[in-house]
Every structure is written in C-alpha cells, then in structure tokens.
Image (tube, rainbow, N blue to C red):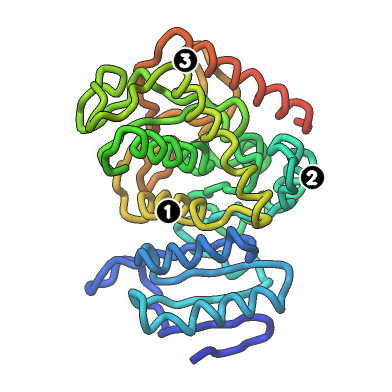
Amino acid sequence: MADEQAGTVQGGEAVPSARGSAARPTAKVAVIGAGAVGATLAYAVLTRGAAREVVLHDIDTAKVRAQALDLAHGIQFLPMAHVVGTDDLAACAGADVVVVTAGAKQQPGQSRIDLAGRTVGLVRTLMPRLAAIAPDAVYLMVTNPVDVVTYAALQCSGLPRAQVIGSGTVLDSSRFRLLVAQHVGVAVQNVHAYVVGEHGDTAVPLWSSATVGGVPLLDLEPLDGREPLTAARRDAIAHDVVHAAYEIIAGKGATNYAIGLAGSRVVEAIVDDEHRVMPVSTLVEDFRGIGDVCLSVPTVVSHDGAGPLLPTPMSDDELAALRRSADTLRDIARQTGP
C-alpha cells in the first residue's frame, strides 16, 4: 500500500538506514524527471533489482505522485524495493546514483544539438543544488544532448570527473550490435562492437574492432548464404544507428524503453561495482589528441563512477571521425556558455 505525505508518495517496505546490511547490499537511486524516460528508467531499475530504494523526483507534483504509486503497486511482482515520489530534491540525500532525465523534450525533426541551450540552462540551475544534497553520488546524465549536458553538469557542479558521466553511446552501441546481429544471423549477445563519440549525428561505429563470437567482424565470411557485409551495407547500418531515434520520435513522440534499459544497466554497473566496460560519456583529456570535451569511448564503470578509458583499436578513418565528433561537441559546449 502507499503512504502519502505532503507531496511525497511511498510504496513498499521500509529500507534499512545503513548501507550494506547483513542480508544483502542496499542501494539508493534517485531519478530526476518523471516523464517517459525517467519513469521507464525507474521501472527498469526496479525490475533488475538494482536498488532497494528508488526516489522519483519531478516539479509536477501530481504526475510524480501518480508515477510512484503506479510503480509501488507492482512491487509484489519485483525484487523488494521502496519507491518514493516527490517534488522535494532533499529526498535525494544519501543516493548512490542520481540519474538526471529532466530537460526539454525533443520534437520530431529536431536534432539533439538543437536542445542544447534550454537544457544546459536547466542543468546549470539544478546540478549545484543536487551536488550539495548528494555530494557522494555518481551522477548519470541522460538528458539530451547528453554529451554537452554532461560537460555542463561537470563544470557547474564542482564534482570530479569520475562522479559525472553521461549515458553516452551505450544505447547507440546496443542499436549497432542489434543491426549487425540481424545482418550476420547470430544472437545480439554474441556481437561485441562499440559506437564512440557523440550520442547523435556524428557518432562513429567502430567496425575495425567489432567481433562476432571472437571473430573480427570484417573477416567473417557470410553465414547461411547471407549477403556479405559490404561497404554500402555498413554505411546503411551506420545511418540507421544514428537516425533510429528520429524514426521513433516521429512515430510515437519519444524514445523511452531502450534508453531506460540502457540507463538502468549503467546504474547496475555502478551500484554493483562491476568494473564493466561501457561507452559512457565522460570528460576526455589527452585521449589520442582529444581533450576538453565529454564524449564516449569504452570506459571502466564501477562504484566510483567513470574509471580508465580503454585504448580501443581504431582505423585511421575512425579516429579522424572521432576527432571531428569531438570538435563538433566542443564547439556546441562553447556556444552554450562557460
């Protein structure tokens, strides 16, 4: 049952106040923004059992109360957790991870970069308050344009690089792997491939380091009489990876399921201290001649947040494209202010 208190809705059983109880570890995850992405991400965190307490925050009190009630009513069918819906940022205190999904909604035909000015302004207001309330949390920025937003959040919060990361190209890489798997005819879990750079129009699929079951993708002979992976087909896949969000937004108004799952997987890597390699967006300094920009390359993700960057092999063309992506993002970040 739900317990309503002055703008806060709670569901499920009480969570022990101390982290790391004898029964099982606990984790508190706060999600800022109760829209389609925020609510779906909170749902994914709960279904994966990644947190024992989920705080959902939004300035729309009625909406966040309703979202929290809806989530809490399903706790019987999920790993045990406690759900809070509130319009009070103070509820984020003590969070292990704070996920920021609040921002301007992307409209059909609008690029992620077009969103930068309005969303960065919101982040510059929000992040100093959050950093004061939850100074030890790892912040996962999901709001688009995520790379520019991550850079702004890092600059205005005063937090160290490791604690402010973006969802980056985790979703792009998942789209890439799916399309490769469909073309080759294997399970997507057997494809290992990354997209790097911007989460957006200048994203760079890394064909040269992609593998299928340990076999370099570009060396793989067609299976079961399938078409070879020609340069034209690779270009078509790259186009579909970059433009997938536009098609979804045109059809239903927003993307939410895949980014909710992708974001929850990053949360899980943090709270479980997995040291998992993920293409999250982080501040890059002196990486193959690239610096002073947030973008995605394969990065070790643990309870401390963003760790070392991996020296993933790239062809000369891929590295040049990554540098162009960095230049684009750096220019946008400068246009949106210091």
Q: Residue at x 57, y 48 (%)?
A: 142
Q: Residue at x 33, y 22 (%)?
A: 228
190 relative position to 64: left or right: left
Q: Contact (CB < 8 A) between labels 1 and 2?
A: no
On screen, 12 above or below 86?
below
Residue under numbered circle 1: 267
Q: What secondary structure is found at the residue carrying circle 1?
A: helix
Q: CA distance from mark 3 to mark 1?
A: 29 Å
Q: Residues within 10 Å of mark 2 (few under 14, many from 20)?
A: few
**Quadrant into which the C terminus falls:** top right
Residue 278 percent across, percent down from the top left = 39, 38
Residue 28 percent across, percent down from the top left = 44, 65
Residue 165 in view (yes/no): no
The front one of 256 and 234 is 234
On screen, 234 above or below 75?
above
Q: What secondary structure is found at the residue carrying circle 2?
A: helix
Q: CA distance from mark 3 to mark 2?
A: 31 Å
Mark carried by residue 210:
none
On screen, 148 above or below 123?
above
Residue under numbered circle 2: 118
Residue under numbered circle 3: 318
The residue under label 2 is which amino acid type? Arg
Q: Residue at x 37, y 41 (%)?
A: 301
The residue under label 3 is which amino acid type? Glu
Q: What secondary structure is found at the residue carrying circle 3?
A: helix
Residue 153 in view (yes/no): yes
The residue under label 1 is which amino acid type? Val
